[in-house]
Image: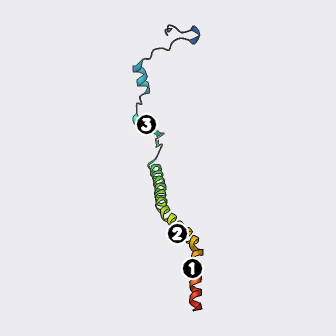
Amino acid sequence: MAERVVGTEPAEGPAPERLNLESDVSDRVATEPHKTSRREGVNVITVRTLVTAALIVLGVVALVAFLASIIGIVLVVLVAIVFAEGIRPLVDDSTAGACHDRSGS
């Protein structure tokens, strides 16, 4: 029978009953450990599923690594294009004057 804990109100109900650890542990331990990871004889996660997931993750990581290595080259090319477009008027002016001087001589 449950004992009443001193200092509790009667409305709170009786104290919890003491547990018999030996019988509770034996109820929770699987009698057949190989059955805990299976459902009706079929693996929950098959080897094929694990290999497929590993290949997908490896592909994503390889793609990210490839893009990370390419981004440096792309940025250098873009900076070179912007710089070249920025100095185009100076080059046009300097070459136009040089061509005009040669043809006038």
Residue type marked 2? Ala
Q: In this view, does 59 lie to the left or right of 11?
A: left
Residue bearing mark 1: 94
Q: How far apart are marks 3 and 2 (CA)?
A: 65 Å
Element at label 2: helix
Element at label 1: helix
Height in image: 37 above or below 22?
below
Of callouts 3 and 2, which one flags the residue occurring earlier in the amino acid sequence?
3
Say if mark 1 contacts mark 2, CB within 8 Å.
no
Residue type marked 3? Lys
Of callouts 1 and 3, which one flags the residue occurring earlier in the amino acid sequence?
3
Instruction: Kindly identify the residue that appears in the image at 43 percent across and 22 percent down.
Output: 24
Instruction: Kindly identify the residue that appears in the image at 41 percent across and 24 percent down.
Output: 25
Name the colour scheme: rainbow
Residue bearing mark 3: 35
Q: Quadrant location of residue 36?
A: top left
Q: Where is residue 7 in the image (x, y as percent from the top left)?
A: 52, 8
Q: Where is residue 35 in the image (x, y as percent from the top left)?
A: 43, 36
Q: Quadrant location of residue 102?
A: bottom right
Q: Position of residue 32 (x, y in %)?
A: 40, 33
Residue type marked 1? Ser
Residue bearing mark 2: 80
Element at label 3: helix
* Crowding near the residue tagged with mark 1, few <14, some 14–19, many ≥20 C-alpha atoms within 10 Å: few
Q: Distance between the residues labelled 1 and 2?
A: 20 Å
Q: In this view, does 34 lie to the left or right of 86?
A: left
Instruction: Kindly identify the residue that appears in the image at 42 percent across and 17 percent down.
Output: 20
Of callouts 1 and 2, which one flags the residue occurring earlier in the amino acid sequence?
2
